[in-house]
Amino acid sequence: MRRTMQAAICVIVVWFTMFELGGWAVYKGEAAVEATAVELTAAAPAAPITITHTEKQPLLAKPAAYESADDVEIEQAVGKKEPDAQTKPSAIDSKPVVPVTTKPSGKTVYLTFDDGPSQHTEQVLDILKAEGIKATFFMLGEQVEQQPDIARQVLAEGHAIGNHSYNHKYEKLYGSFAVFAEQVMKADDAIFAATGVRTPLFRAPGGTYSNFDQGYFDAMAAAGYIIHDWNVDSGDSKRRGVPSSEIIATVKGSKLADSLNVLLHDGGGHEESVKALPAIIAYYKEKGYSFAPITTAVTPIHFSLAKKLKWSRPAVKESEKAALVLYAEQLGRDRMTLPQPAHTEPNLILHRGEEQLVLSPEEYSLSKGSIKVSLAKLTEWIGGTAELDPDSGVVEAYYNGERIYWLTDFALGGAKGRDEAAIVPVRSTLQKFGLAIENYVYNAERREIWVK
Ligand SMILES: [Zn+2]
């Protein structure tokens, strides 16, 4: 039998009565903070509630605004040890800055995708988004010129961008530093033209080993570029069409360390890398790793200098080095004053058995240690129903014999429309439905909750 509720005034009276009686209000800090919401359940002692139900409508699909109530238990469980998700990018020194977050703590994987952007990049982005993780894309200037929209999308979705030369042609790049430097600058300009960002991150085509000599390293450092080799080679480019199974096996067979820089490719012809990606991510998650984009705070991995280079070429001339340094210095001011892309929050992923609910950053919030989501989305995901009565502003959610009522701002006398979606604390709402949070991860890069 459904219990329904009358007009908002009536409910408010009941609500205040319940506070007086004690034991009903789930959100302890709420009354003092903002008296906007209350939960009732069928299991609670019945207060006299008159029933007049009006026309029903599905609840707004997208939360319109977030409540500010506390969920004390989540605060205790989650709030104390998470890194500050809002960490502002900061200039380390007068060098160019990669406009993303600082270095994360704990075991971290830096997934890197080289040679794009290409037609595969969007698939990679979709996977990363679904997994709620950020990565780094070392792009070729030539590719960026052909696919500037994708380059912008990479940045807009919170990933880092690095320079990977203009056209990747080894003989040119490593035949003379003058040509190499020209390609660095040309790619730098192409990335800037497409994205508005000057990246100091650089990955040498083929890696630095037996390609770079000390002169290359010195000149690039003097110009403010930060070179990143890798310590996990997925082997996805050791020949054409390496199958995904082999890529996954190579990654799994690689040595683990607290900080892993994983070489992958999103250039043309790398569909097998895309196929392998979910399993690679799952593997590192299972091993307890977080994922992050490379920032200037990340200690780069450099291969050692080879005793013998693959190339015979003259040493880097002072004039060649000076040209690159001058270019970088002239950009110096621009680099520092460029608009910083907004820090994008990861998705929130709820797990229950095999089922997942993926919520974009707009669809959940964290305030005062309490993770809040749409009551309708949460209820429907666990297999219940939720409906808004637009006339009273009351949201009613039902699952497994338990019922929750939620008063929107409107129900409490506020303006209609702004806050009709009920945004509720995850933990206590699940508890009302007889479910519990088994485990969670909540940090700047990864936000997941396991429900049992
Ligand atoms: Zn490459």
Image: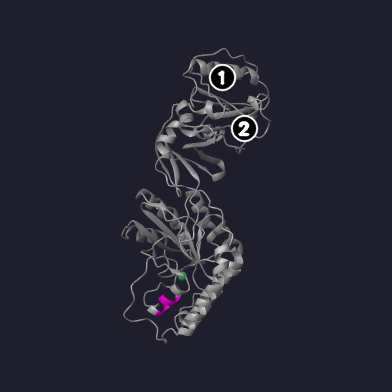
Residue 430 image point, x, y percent: 47, 30
- Element on which disc 1 rests: helix
Please tell me how crowded label 2 is: few (under 14), some (14-19), or many (20+) other residues with Cα within 10 Å: many
Residue 38 image point, x, y percent: 55, 24
Camera-side residue of 369 and 353: 369
How many numbered discs, if any? 2
Residue 205 in view here: no
- Quadrant where the image shows the N terminus: top right
Point out the stretch of residues depicted in magenta.
Answer: 215-219
Camera-side residue of 253 and 435: 435
Q: Is residue 427 magenta?
A: no
Camera-side residue of 206 and 428: 428
* Distance of label 2 from label 1 (alpha carbons): 22 Å
Predominant secondary structure in magenta? helix
Q: Quadrant of residue 335?
A: bottom right
Q: Is residue 217 magenta?
A: yes
Residue 90 in view here: yes
Determine which residue is flagged by label 1: 15
Residue 359 image point, x, y percent: 53, 43
Please state which amino acid type lies under the numbered disc 1. Answer: Trp
Q: Which residue is rendered at x = 49% and y = 20% of the image?
A: 24
Determine which residue is flagged by label 2: 59
For marks 2 and 1 on the same chain, the one whose residue lies earlier in the sequence: 1
Please state which amino acid type lies under the numbered disc 2. Answer: Leu
- Element on which disc 2 rests: loop
Which dot, 2 or 1, sits closer to the camera? 1
Q: Quadrant of residue 318?
A: bottom left
Residues under numbered marks 2 and 1 in contact, where contact means CB atoms less than 8 Å apart? no
Q: Which residue is rendered at x = 53% and y = 77% of the image?
A: 326
Q: Which residue is rendered at x = 34% and y = 50% of the image?
A: 287
Left-right relation of 7 to 252: right
